[in-house]
Image (cartoon, helix red, strand yellow):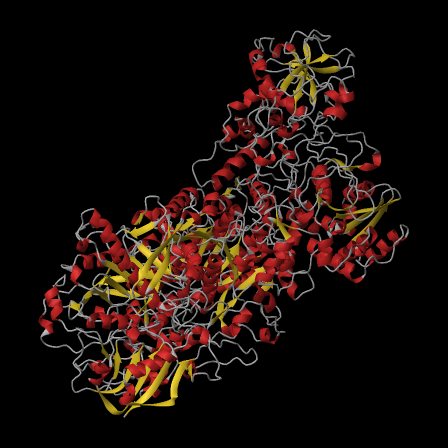
Amino acid sequence: MGNSYAGQLKSARFEEALHNSIEASLRSSSGDPQPIFTQLYLEPEPYPGNVEDIKPKADLHGGEPPGNELMNGHSSNDPEELEEDDDSDSSSPPLPYLQAPAPDGCCTLDGFCQAGKDLRLVSIATEPIEVPAGFELVGAKSPSVPEHILVCAVDRRFLPDENGKNALLGFSGNCVGCGEKGFRYFTEFSNHINLKLSTQPKKQKHLKYYLVKNSQGALCKGPLICWKDCKSRQISSSASTSKPSSSSSHSSKENGGASGHSSSTFSFSDSPPTRTTQMSSVFFGSQDLGRDCSFLKPLSSTSGNKTLPIVPTALRVNGPMNCLVDGRPPLLSPSQVSLGPQGPAYRTPDLGDSPASSAMNSGPPKKRHRSWHPNSLVPVPPTAVPVPAIRPIVCSPGAVLGMSSPQPPVAGVIQPQPVTAGETVIVPDNLLNSSGVRPVILIGHGTLPYFYGNVGDIVVSPLLVSCYKSSQLTEKTLETLGLNSSQLLCVETMILLTLQYLARLGLVQIPLREELEQIVLKAMLCCPRGPAISPSQLPWLARLEASVSGGSVQVVVTHNSLGEGISESLRSLSDGPHHQKCLPTYVVIICASKMSGNEFCVLVLGKYQARALAEGMLTTNEFLKEISYELITGKVSILASHFKTTSLGDNLDKQLVRYQRRWKGQVIQPFQGDVTDHIHSQEAAGMSPPSERELLSKLFQIYPTQLSVARSLLSQVCSIADSGTQNLDLGRFCKVDFLVLVPPSHILVHQTAQRIRQSGVLVDLGIEDVCSAHQKSDKYVVRLDGEVHAKMEAFMRKVKQNPYTLFVLIHDNSHVDLTSALSGSVCHGELQGLADRVVNCQEVLDAMNLLVLQVSCFPYTLQTHQSRISIHNEVHWPSGESLQGEQPPNELLYFGLRDYSSSLQWGVASPILRCDDAFEKMVHTLLERHPHLHSMVIRSYLLIQQYTEAMMALTSSPSLRDHITPETLAMVEDLINAPGREGSQGRGHMLLVRVPSLQLAMLARERLEDVRDKLGLQLCFAVLLGSPATELNLQKNFTNRLKAWRGCENEDWVPHTYEDLEGLPCIVILTGKDPLGETFPRSLKYSDLRLIDSSYLTRTALEQEVGLACTHVTMGVVHEPKKAMAPRESDGEKATTGLNDGDELERPQSNGSAATRTSGSLAENGVSSSDIADSFQRPSTSTCPPEGAITSDMGTAAQGFKQECDSVESQLSSNPSKASKAPPSLYSSSSSSSPSSSSTQRPSQSTQCVREPKPTRVSPRTVIMSRAAYSLLAGESGSQLSSFSLLPHADVAWSSPLRPLVTHNLQGEERSMYYREWTIARQHHADYEAPSVPHPRRMLLSGPPQVGKTGAYLQFLRILFRMLIRLLEVDVYDEEEEEEEETSEVTTLVKTQLPDIEEVRKLPFDPYPRDPKFRKASPVYTDKRSKCLKDFKQEGESHTPDKRVTKSIRLSRFAAHNAFHHCEQCHHYCEAGPATQLSECTFHAFTFCSSMLGEEVQLQFVIPKAKEQHFVFSQQGSHLESMRLPLVSTKDPDRLKSPIFTPTTGRQEHGLLNIYHAMEGATHLHILVVKQFEMPLYRKYWPNHILLVLPAVFNNTGVGAARFMIKELSYHNLELERNRLEEQGVKRQDVWPFIVMMDDSCVLWNSHQPADSSETSDGTNVSLKMVLQHMENTPKISLYAMCGTRRWSSSLARKSPSHPFSRCHLHDLVMLNVDLTQNVHYDLNRYSCEEVDFNLRVNSSGLLLCRFNYFSLMKKHIPVGGNKDFLVKPKLVDMGNPTSISPPQYVCAPDSEQTLLDAPAQFLLERFLQSCSHRLFPKAVRNRSNPVLSIDSYLNISPEISVCYINSRPHSTNLNHQGLLFSGLLLYLCDSFVVSGLLKKFRFLKGATLCVICQDRSSLRQTIVRLELEDEWQFRLRDEFQTANCSDDRPLYFLTGRHV
């Protein structure tokens, strides 16, 4: 069988390989593992670790390509090696070569043979070596000492000639060190010379050089041995592989040496010709880095995912001692070591950083490594290591662990030196066997000695070393701690503190780093420096301190070195059993030497403590590997045989078989019977429990706290969007989609998918319909296993393809496996680093439409100094205290970790948190007997025996009762008897046993099942293996029982989650490295954590185990003493935070949307009807309350459900009047800010049919723990440290040796800040190299285990979607137009699409402004009595404006948008391109003469380059001549003929000025008309729009001025275009005369086509383009003066328009014929009602207005801008007395002393008339029969006064006023057409009043004279008024009088 040791395959190697193969098959989730023999004989290669840490040295010399270095894991410089390794497969790391163990007591030192003789060329180059005839001296290379060549003598026949030929197969060689001859196999020889190969030994690979003598006669390296024809390769590859060498020649013959051999072409720097240069120049050869990974990889890479060779102890001990906190390389200071070319530095984090510190995690390594040789009898323990003699590092005396002068970092093995006797310690052989303890040396302060000999039996731990590093604290840290540098403790005080601490530790306590650190900190704070202790006092004081320990602490004082004391202690330990009786637990060794000051270390000899410390140094992965190794290699056989007998000494199996035979196939009755009742197994199998369907308890509920947390998440998203950093643009998203990543557990996937199904979130988000949501919920949950990459790629593709969908990647239980992808590998059968690869990959980080939400119950590992999550993006679950007041008495209350701790103070007889002391005693006895086994193996075997014997005691052997711990007996008794109790219907309890190791768990299940079956209990309870890697596997009869309870008809139903096992009596053996967040049913009663011991010494590890038992309990169950405790400080974060943020976005509080809002927030609390219906239609689907949120056993109808059916909701929202009839439950909690209301709610009708059984009590689960874990959890009440002070997670390290104390009050954000300040990520942590700035779109939700986080984040998705929809909705005015009375003749009109001008002319004009926006305006008198005037509204009296009714409408694709809208289609329309600057626009003045103003007006156009084609410029190109107009005959479906003008002010952001979508992208001309001072703002927001800038004099005017200028400009432009086109032969009347004037709040347009069928059409959204083109296509369009549409209201949906067209007022969107209306002008001065005024004038001029009634326009409610109101304030503000000014103060007597106001005169006049006209026209108030006569103008003189409009122009059409008596006359700025003759035609009531308004006093007098008013009207001097302006602001004057 080839070159094996002694010619055969040794059994140890075979066992090892077999073990690997079995282990691989157990863990393999894919195909078959590699066969055993492949593992034994294929050459695997080392696996590259953290690639970036290995910088190939060759690169520095222009050397080999990095690819090769990566492939082989070492940068190889030998052509031979390159060739040998090239063909190896690099895709996966194979199992390393397994070398036979060295015989006991042999030297295993690198560079020495097994006899201990030196073989290194540098040592024996000058010594005489006997070479037998026919032998040659050759140099072998050992990978473990790459810088050395080992000398060997080999038979020449087995070496090749110079052509690489003729070497015989086989091998014959001698050892030149000890002289042993006749090695016939190279494998055997390589073992002897300690080559320690990781691959199959081959002479061709490892025998490298001939050795030749140089001129001085010393041996030196000669030419390469030419194993293949390598000459050609030498030359070609020399450039790429050689390093600069002293020999420049490339010929092998030129430099002939003494022996005729040439010195090699490759004169490698690691074997110089003489010894003298060896140390100085090339001690660290540059390729040594790549050769042995053990010094390359950071010492602490222990995440369980690197091939970690064993680091020699001395290097491991000394490296960490000096390794700085911030991860700089260790500094070495031995003076003897002279440093050569320095290798690349490598980082090592502070290895003294935690008890679980990886510095020592030497074994068993991740893969069986070459230097790890288990011996069949005395295995090398996990923490033991073969250690070369290495010079220890000397720490300079002085401050504790002061650093020596820094030297360059060193990589590589330190050269062994001759050493003096006192500094070495030889570890006695068989130390472990003889003493039963493997001593642990705790590094203290000072130099540790070398260890030789049986180093496997000692462990060196850096556990407490950081406590002595206070001198390294930075000034800043000291300041934080309230210290200064003068308070640092000296070494002597440290020694005494340590002694004091150890002396006070209990018998079963182990030293904890955090505990000692707190003691040190307190000492510094209370007694800085302390009294000086002289060297002579120290030993005396130390012994005094130790004397209080009762012998458990001893002090050994030495004067030379620490080694002396260690040596002495070890010797006395190994001297045999007679010493063992009085063995101390701790020996503190103090070296009080004069030269180096005081040094000390601690030797732990207590069996329990030493074992616990050694085991605690392994990571979880490593100790699980160690356990599996012990099981597979049969090391446990002695233990197993011990448990083959019962506690009474009988053979267990025989007894069981005997019992089985006695009952002959009968079994114990499964339920409704006693343990003693046996029935036939077939009869028992046929029994089925009564079925009862509990539907109500199955409904998914969202609890108030979950809702509150969901809202906090939402407000967090909003604040990310609002931060102004452009990281999230919520406005662009219209959908929400998500993916949940969970740890690799099948059960967790089912559980999460089930929650998604029940919550109905897929339907609510609109991603699936009701049918598909049920099947497809699994698609939204992905396990982090091998298949995750494909699924993530598909998800990321979806993210890229849907830029308008907001994706949320939810990483649930994100604290599990946060290993960095670089260090990730397959470890202990689990893929690691996957989460990092997925969540932190660049694609995920860069996607702007992807939020990452990390959810965790133990977020500590995500909250380090390097965290990727901003502290502002964390949302913490509100704590129990802050919720207490809100819970109704029958609600469930969360019972969590802190409640378990505080339950110890309840003082009840059977506490719910217990430690099984009897079990611990048994464990201790067994631990002493089996020092070689891992304690968890021993605990597991004992636990299995306890359960086995408990079952026997309860059925067959009552005599065993005394040998079982009471805890075990009680649990098993409850398990077996509960189903038989009255009223249980066969239901029982679940017992959870936590066994982390898969092999032990399988063993436990097999054993318990076997015993159960033999005792006839197989139908009483199930035994299940709960493994993350497998589905639940339940026997058929138990599945049937569950189906019967559920009333489930589905044949194929099987339980998929633990919750599905509700009520089933069972033992679940939960295995796996960590619990992964699975929820357990309410029937879980006991959680057995007795295996969780001192290996779980981090906060996360410990708390997640206890977290398994956390749940919601009935309020009354929690014992009273809890309330009597001192009230805890409230936890900053209240449940109410953020209750209303996010959901209630800014929107008008409109009365109409009250119902909508109510139902909206109701829907948040409940579920959509789809899932309620689901649970009723398909009882088979397993449904349950949210994660841990328990309703009650029988269903809690009494508690009420916050739910409603969509049908009810839709009724509510569509018809406010019906809302009052909705069931009262819908109104009881509209925003759920008062969760207590839920208790008063009734369930909705759909569920009321279900009977209401009484709710059952839900009690906390009982947790049974090991002593170590119990004392940490009880620490809050006890004296010892509590779990929350421990290191938060094994993947992080404390950033400072001392820190402030953690208290249990540190919750939420404070706790996060603490961990962010005081912890750092270790090198293998995913955040280790995180960018310095946290990721903006990443959030963290943290909450205690099983509190309901899943429900909260699903609810968050729902309200996030609702908010996005809300952002896509607008509030539009929804007000019904006041209808006129219909006349019978009109209704016969044919409903046509386009108006016929003759038909339209026949229609009467309706002067009454019916639009709701004119509700506050004066009605216009008509001769037809319209029903709208029946009663005047009382509004005039109150000045508080009432809110206008709005309705929320979803934007369609034809909507107009504001500046916040961004999408791919229209970005070029509204956003400036990156290249274009604002200067791309050109400014053009346009001057024309206004006939109305009688002067020249200069307007300014701002025209972007892209829009210049719409204009005509002069030949020079600079002067703007006109704006192009099309022809009437032009027919272009893609073009709009009319230019659109939008007057806008104050709405540069909020105005709906983006009409790209409304125009369907068609070509159009859109001009914004803005005031001069706002021009820069509009330019900034709308760089691509044409701006028309009004002159500065219009800065304070109202909208009338803008409309006036638009019309004037348009008419002037029409004339210019007619002139221009006339020259081209176009008739003047053919030029298009229309413009469109549109408000900046028009958002949507609808078409209400006359419905043919009986039901009415709701109106379809159409585009603005369609509406305008339809109007433009009207026949004879040029004959119409104005066209427009009606205003939308929801009532339009119920009835189609009665007439397709009508003649009435037009506004908001008007198509205006500027040619026909040439002589009718908008009132330039007006602020309001300018449209009514204009329309009345146009109509009375005989022109045609036509409204298209089947189009409607929606106007958005925009609360800002629009110049609705001036802030009227005094001109001179009196700061001391600010007064509010009411409308009556807007006018004053001329020249009075009254306060003058800073507002335009016209504005004051309009507001005055609107509010105070009842004083001017008392007779007209509410008198519609006698209106006020208003000539040539319409002014709003309050809604209580009717106005009769009369046009004074000749030929105008006016109302027939014959017989009409007017109650007043209003003359407003009347012109020359108003003459006295005209006024004489009208008749007035007696006492009617007059009001004449003029520009100034003189024109007022002239008007009165010209119109001869004094003939009929009586004036008084005091009846003259002016607006309250100063004379500079040109006030308006008016005079009032009475008719005589």
Quadrant containing the N terminus in the rendered view: top right
Tell me if residue 550 comes above or below residue 147 in the rendering: below
Identity of the residue drawn at 70% across and 57% down: 515
Quadrant containing the C terminus in the rendered view: bottom left
Answer left or right for 1141 relative to 231: left
Please state the horizontal and vertical placement of residue 476, each as a whole percent of the image: 71, 54
Residue 79 in sight from this viewpoint: yes
Answer left or right for 222 relative to 964: right
Please state the horizontal and vertical placement of residue 1476, each as a whole percent of the image: 42, 46
Instruction: Compare residues 1821 and 118 and report the one nearer the observer.
Output: 1821
Tell me if residue 1455 comes above or below residue 628 in the rendering: below
Instruction: Compare residues 918 and 1899 and report the one nearer the observer.
Output: 1899
Tell me if residue 1748 comes above or below residue 274 in the rendering: below
Instruction: Compare residues 1546 and 523 and report the one nearer the observer.
Output: 1546
Instruction: Compare residues 721 and 216 and report the one nearer the observer.
Output: 721
Please state the horizontal and vertical placement of residue 1345, each as a whole percent of the image: 51, 60
